[in-house]
Amino acid sequence: KFYLFCDIFSVSEADQLPASFELLHSFALWATPFKPISVSVARKYLSAVQAWHIAQGWPPPLSDIHHGRIDWSLRGLENLQSSCRKPLCPPITSLMLMALKATLTLSNPFDACVWAMAACTFFGMMRFGEVPVASQGAFTPTKHLSRASAFFGADLRGNPYMRLDLPSAKKARAGKVQSVFLNEQGDLCPLAALHNLALVVPALTDDPLFSWCDGKGNIWPMAKAHAIEQINSILVAWGWGTSFGHSFRIRGASFYLAQKIDPEIIGL
């Protein structure tokens, strides 16, 4: 399981052995997130990693103090999960995003919109409910993202980025706009996804940012239920089951942490 963790988060072999406390702390929190947290189970995983270190001629990677700190974190998660009434959802991974992009037809207006939403929520660490509308008749520019809410630019080094101004966000104060910044991300690039959406679904500035057009050219905002249904049907076909809501936001944050981005910057 430690190998799987390192593979998912692109941890180099040099960082795997010897493993740092920070890496093993993250591994312990990742190892059992979708079932009731068990300190004893997590410790078994860590004991296996420790035995592997000793077998390779390295000293034990964790001290008693380190184990105590990890136990404290796990018990905190256990307390948080005990108050959760809904079952936890598995997070979206970069492999799932690759599967989505490979399956969706990006020249199709509906699929192009779903892909742009998925890429932006993942790399923008947004809650999925902040991107679509509840129903096709519920779009309001003062509450939802419109084409006018998106701004392309370049930083001081000339690197392109995009800023999305959320008129209404779950954690923002009423009436305060929350800005989300996106940059290039290789084959899964959200900027490319938005450029493609603009080409496939030409719309006016007051139209929804995440919208699609029917055969008659009518522009429709993407409803959350329709987007989730499309995403889930693809993930089920690939053998991953279903994912909802915070799944994009959680794994998006994990992606940036794995890239060694400062947690304080991610929190902004």
Image (spheres, helix red, strand yellow):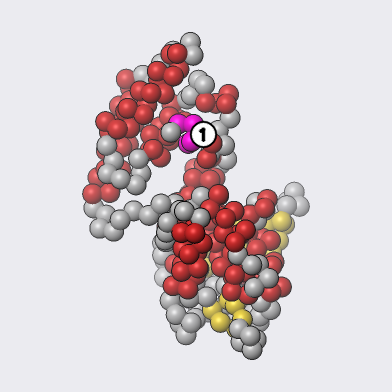
Q: Which residues are magenta?
A: 2-6
Note whether 152 is above or below 136 in the view shown: above
Helix or strand or loop: what does disc 1 sit on? Answer: helix
Q: What x and y, as percent, mark residue 233?
A: 48, 64
Q: Quarter-wise, where is residue 188 in the image?
A: bottom right
Magenta part mainly helix, strand or loop? helix
Q: Quarter-wise, where is residue 55 in the image?
A: top left
Q: Within the magenta stretch, is there residue 131?
A: no
- Looking at the image, the residue that sits furthest to the right is 158
Residue 262 vs residue 79, the one in the foreground: 79
Q: What x and y, as percent, mark residue 169?
A: 45, 66
Q: What x and y, as percent, mark residue 18?
A: 50, 20
Q: Within the magenta stretch, is there residue 3?
A: yes
- Name the residue at 68% across, 70% down: 107
Identity, as a three-letter code, of the amino acid under mark 1: Cys
- Name the residue at 53% across, 39% down: 9
* Residue at mark 1: 6
Note whether 114 is above or below 74 in the view shown: below
Can the viewer see residue 69?
no
Label 1 packing within 10 angstroms: few (<14), some (14-19), many (20+)? some
- Name the residue at 66% across, 82% down: 204
